[in-house]
């Protein structure tokens, strides 16, 4: 199935519980707003494009459950739910982008039932568009990869981070689909190991060769000449930086030192055209994500922990940004990308 979807019969959200992978593949159901918010906060569903779908479906769920009898009352319920959903992951812009898009679509409604239908239809449209967008990103980015390339990636920007196909891994999939021999080196991505748990799992499902390394090995493998290209996804792109999973900036610095192309693959919905690095709140995660690994304690209970979910990579460290519209090269002109 897709990473996240709307069940038209039960009128609930179905999603793959990514916290259980790779040990167990399980599809869970979110039948109310609190269960969806918990799924987002706990990373049962994660990745910028998938969060966009989650935001849209969250409003579809709200519209379905709301007892509102007037358009104003329903809109009020939707806006409240949207604010709650947005607060679960403040850095990833796709979440707020999708919610704002669905809310804006309700302006075409003429009655309360019509508004409910519009919300559900717009949420489904966002999900469908995500798959099409990722295929276009993949096609554009595949031209940057040569037969025999070894591509390093960080975190998970594959189909598990999207409704389907993927952004960074979508580029790899498209290149393989074109007949190119591509191998992947996946960084484990501490502290929650999305690279080792998710990226390796989904690539192995597709029989795409993948080798797992620790995050701290990236400089070593680059220096040894084992990496040809690096492709990562993005949770938010502003005029001056790319926000992505913590550790991305470090890889970009090492890539520049070793003259390895460093690509970012992301839909235009991940762009914050009005923002800059200082305007974005970086999510801070639970300190116990570092104190414990798999339920086993690896640090003193009272040790101070700094655990940001994302870091910012300056544009000067990026070789190209791959979107559904085109591949953009430095100097990156926001107005051109916006179009």
Image (cartoon, rainbow, N blue to C red):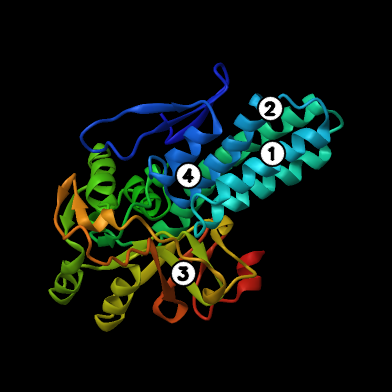
- Looking at marks 3 and 1 on the same chain, the residue that comes earlier in the sequence is marked by 1
Q: What label does residue 11 carry, if any? A: none
- Looking at marks 4 and 2 on the same chain, the residue that comes earlier in the sequence is marked by 4
- Looking at marks 4 and 1 on the same chain, the residue that comes earlier in the sequence is marked by 4
Disc 4 secondary structure class:
helix
Alpha carbon separation for disc pair 2 and 1: 9 Å
> Who is closer to the viewer here, 305 or 173?
305
Tell which tag, 3 or 1, sits nearer the viewer: 1
> Who is closer to the viewer here, 157 or 87?
87
**Image point 24% across, 55% down: which residue?**
184
Alpha carbon separation for disc pair 3 and 1: 30 Å
Asked which quadrant contains residue 109, the reply is top right
What residue did someone put label 4 on? 50
Q: Residues within 10 Å of mark 2 (few under 14, many from 20)?
A: some
Disc 3 secondary structure class:
strand
What residue did someone put label 1 on? 78
What residue did someone put label 3 on? 242
Question: Where does the image place residue 21, in percent across and percent down from the top left?
Answer: 26, 38
Disc 2 secondary structure class:
loop
What residue did someone put label 2 on? 66
Tell which tag, 3 or 2, sits nearer the viewer: 2
Alpha carbon separation for disc pair 4 and 1: 20 Å
Q: Is 327 on the left-hand or right-hand side of 150?
A: right
Examine the rendering and report whether any part of residue 251 can be seen. yes
Q: Looking at the rendering, in which quadrant would you find the C terminus? A: bottom right
Question: Where does the image place residue 263, in percent across and percent down from the top left?
Answer: 39, 67
Q: Is 76 on the left-hand or right-hand side of 167?
A: right
- Looking at marks 4 and 3 on the same chain, the residue that comes earlier in the sequence is marked by 4
**Image point 54% across, 58% down: which residue?**
270
Q: State the residue lying farthest toward the front.
A: 302
**Image point 39% across, 78% down: which residue?**
317
């Amino acid at each position: 199935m897709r990473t996240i979807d709307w069940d038209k019969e039960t009128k609930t959200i179905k999603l793959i519980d990514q916290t259980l992978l790779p040990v167990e593949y399980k599809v869970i159901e979110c039948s109310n707003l609190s269960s969806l918010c918990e799924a987002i906060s706990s990373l049962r569903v994660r990745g910028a494009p998938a969060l966009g779908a989650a935001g849209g479906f969250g409003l579809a769920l709200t519209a379905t459950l709301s007892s509102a009898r007037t358009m104003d009352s329903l809109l009020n319920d939707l806006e409240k739910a949207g604010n709650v959903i947005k607060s679960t992951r403040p850095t990833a812009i796709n979440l707020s982008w999708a919610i704002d898009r669905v809310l804006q679509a309700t302006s075409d409604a003429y009655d309360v039932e019509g508004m409910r239908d519009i919300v559900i239809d717009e949420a489904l449209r966002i999900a469908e568009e995500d798959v099409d967008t990722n295929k276009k990103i993949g096609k554009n980015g595949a031209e940057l990869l040569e037969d025999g390339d070894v591509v390093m990636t960080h975190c998970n920007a594959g189909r598990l981070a999207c409704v389907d196909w993927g952004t960074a891994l979508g580029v790899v999939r498209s290149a393989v689909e074109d007949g190119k021999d591509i191998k992947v080196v996946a960084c484990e991505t501490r502290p929650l190991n999305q690279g080792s748990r998710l990226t390796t799992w989904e690539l192995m499902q597709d029989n795409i060769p993948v080798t797992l390394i620790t995050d701290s090995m990236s400089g070593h493998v680059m220096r040894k000449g084992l990496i040809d290209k690096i492709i990562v996804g993005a949770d938010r792109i502003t005029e001056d930086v790319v926000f992505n999973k913590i550790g991305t900036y470090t890889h970009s610095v090492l890539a520049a030192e070793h003259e390895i192309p460093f690509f970012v693959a992301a839909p235009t919905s991940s762009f914050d055209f009005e923002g800059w690095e200082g305007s974005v709140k970086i999510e801070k995660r639970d300190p116990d994500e570092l104190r414990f690994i798999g339920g086993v304690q690896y640090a003193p209970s009272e040790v101070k922990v700094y655990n940001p979910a994302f870091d910012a990579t300056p544009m000067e460290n990026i070789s190209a940004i791959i979107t559904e519209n085109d591949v953009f090269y430095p100097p990156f002109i926001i107005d051109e990308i916006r179009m």
